[in-house]
Image (spheres, grey):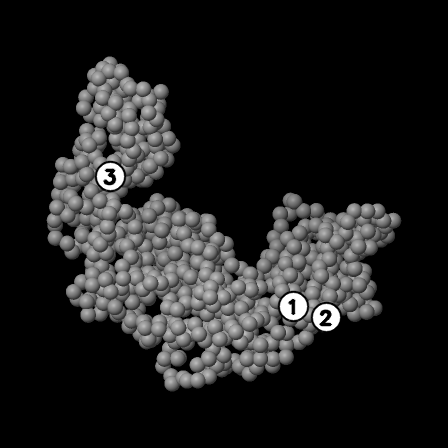
Amino acid sequence: MTRIRLVIASPGDVTPERDAVEKVCTELNRQLGRSNDFAIEVYRWETDSGPGFHVKGPQGKIDQDLPISDCDIMVAIFWTRFGSPTLLPGGETGTEHEINLAFESWKKNQKPQILIYFKNEAVDWDEIDADQIARVKNFQKEFRPGGRYEQGQYETFSKIDDFKDKLRQHLSRQLPLHGNAAPSSGFDFDGYRTRFGYAPKWDLSNIWVAQAPGDAPVSPTLEQIYQELRIAEKFDPGQLSLGAPLSVEDVAVLEDRILLIGAAGAGKTTWVRHVFYRLLQRNDVCPFLIELRKLAETLQGRKVTGKARSLVSYLEAALEELDCKAQGLEDALKDRAGPRPILLVDGWDELGSLGREFRQKLASFVRSYPRVGVIATSRPYGLEKPDVDDGFAQRYVQPLNDEEIEAFSNRFWAICYGTDPKHAESAQRFLAALKSAPSARAPARTPLLCTMMLFISRSRTLPDERHDLYQACIEHMLSAYRREEAHVPGMAHHWRPEKMNERLRAAAALAFAIHAEGRGDRNQTIVLSARKMANLLPGDCEEHGPGFLAWLAGPAGLLTDRSDGSLSFAHLSFQEYLAAWHVANVLPEDQQSFDKWCTVSRWQEVLRLWAAIMWSGRRERFAAVAEQFLGSSEGLCALGGMLADGWGNPELFRRWLERFLMLVETCPPRQVSECGRAWAGCRQTQRRDEFQDAWNRAVQAGRGSHERGRSSSAERQVWCCRARPVKLRRAIGESKVRGTVLWDGYGRSRLRHGRRSPGRLPSARRGHRLDGSWGCGSKLS
């Protein structure tokens, strides 16, 4: 085995870059070293020089321990420091001395090859040594004609990823000089990289958001806007810190093959395009991208038989169609000396019934070319996806968390407005709109929908109210075109009604029917088989049911299709809003239905969204339902949620508040808890304060009359419903009565059981609390 000795020389202000050199060498050893019988050995003073004494001082000890003059490659890095002085004559710093030793050896023996890098990242001038930075600049000038190092050249970089990419390329070019054989396949790697190595544009074909008049077009490169995706071994939307990005460096050295699974709009295709482009910048790997939708069309649309249906034949034909030489491709896939091939396979779910055939072809491909790394992507429902038996590890794309949404939106607005003050204002306005409507944050966790919302907010203010936001997003989703060219066997032809209003009505009718299919009191996404869901479509869509569902799950992205062929709405919020729209615009006015829905938890959000729609246009209908709700304890809680959202006039609110305080003890615990959560998130400051004041007055009155042995019915209700203090500011605000709280809005307040209160107050009764729990009353402390 050929051992290639590499020495790192640098001052102490570039420690991350020193570590990066070792990581890059480890990658190259794993990728190229084993097959070419070489190993890069990295030497650095931190790990290869120990304590001791030397007549020439510490630098003499380092010279003794590190093979500086006899190494094969030296990597030297500078930023703001030139190094510490040594005991050597001439006042050389340690780094300068090591470079000069290597340089004198190169002049005699043409080795080592010296790779020198200067970091040009911005610095805080108040924290740097002016003399040190001046010496760095003077050293850099020595590479000019007439300078000491005029025979050489250096490289600059700004970020550590930039440094790693450049170092990887430069080292790869040096390796053939030190025992690595040049690729023998005959494939034109340089021509291939040149043909496909352009920076890809950000693909907005699935957004369908019209450009606002006067707005500058948004056309950034993918690299400018790209948001890293977290990837994990499981998918849990409730854990927003799960997983970590799968970097290009990780992909390049992966030994496991990976199936990357994500829902519609999760960012799989964007991730593949980003990785493909970044891999093209490296000399140690060569990526190939197959879009399976195009492959399926090719295999189905042409009379392709025999060897022509193989993956290698498809890759060769695809390269030739794009005027790229395919000669030597098969040899390049087999070659153990050249760049490692990485195959990126995007869109397994678009294969339809061809999934089984392609799975067999892929299995044969990896057996024939075991050095090739493979990553495939799919929605959960892809047929015949590769699994662990095929050597594929399944990984899942995770939803965006709050920090990632903020970072993505900041880049978006920076691209739209650059340094214009509008950038910061727009970003803050967008994030404030999401914060003010927490339920709107769920769609924003999907990259595609987050992008859609950003474009909506660019052309007009992102709606403050969540129902307006849902309406805007759904309208744009329902504007998606049919994919006319998708005639893949096993996949339904896409169909949609011609008029937008017809699409909205059909989608709303479906959402209402699905929501009505729910069982029990749980508020969750409802999953149905495609056949059953097709049966729930309105009559005018029955004939085209499968095609309409395929369109909703495909270009529109309103539905999500699953691995077992079942379907559900992509987000529960969209299902609830469309169900509310159907109730408001289609269903007859049936008070009995409202009386039934107000007792079921899964209908509470639908009723609140219905109230928002009605208050915007048909207030008389809202008033009629509100009057009916005032007459029942279940209806009181449902109406409380609507009023907490700001709907209804002040008179209705005051009437509701009076009755609620009178009857709260008779209300079902779960409904009271849901009402409490609505008020905990209330943004109507005046109503919230009025509610709090009324509550505190009732508690004070209840305490006073309780201690005097007298209490009214209303006071007894409130007294029995109080709970001990728990994070009051997270609920409705600081209580003026020490020791009281309404609820914390999270179901966490608990009342300790205490001794029975004196007087006539029936505190021994198991009283109902506003957090939905039950317990005996106890004296305030």
Kindly report which numbered mark, 3 or 1, lies closer to the viewer in this rendering: 1
The residue where tag 1 is placed is 34
Q: Secondary structure at mark 1?
A: helix
* Amino acid type of the residue tagged 1 in the rendering: Arg
Q: Residues within 10 Å of mark 1 (few under 14, many from 20)?
A: some
Residue 419: in sight, yes or no?
no
Q: Quadrant of residue 186?
A: bottom right
Q: Which callout, 2 or 3, points at the residue further toward the start of the chain?
A: 2
Marks 2/3: CA–CA distance: 75 Å
Q: How far across and down, in percent of the image, does residue 224 sit?
A: 49, 61
Q: Residues within 10 Å of mark 2 (few under 14, many from 20)?
A: some
Which numbered disc covers residue 241? none
**In this orientation, which residue lies closer to the viewer: 150 or 505?**
505
Q: Residue furthest top?
A: 708
Marks 3/1: CA–CA distance: 66 Å
Q: How far across and down, in percent of the image, does residue 211 sit?
A: 35, 62
Q: Which callout, 3 or 1, points at the residue further toward the start of the chain?
A: 1
* Amino acid type of the residue tagged 3 in the rendering: Gln
Q: Secondary structure at mark 3?
A: helix
Q: Residue furthest right?
A: 55
Residue contact at pointers 2 and 3, CB within 8 angstroms? no
Which numbered disc covers residue 178? 2
Kindly report which numbered mark, 2 or 1, lies closer to the viewer in this rendering: 1
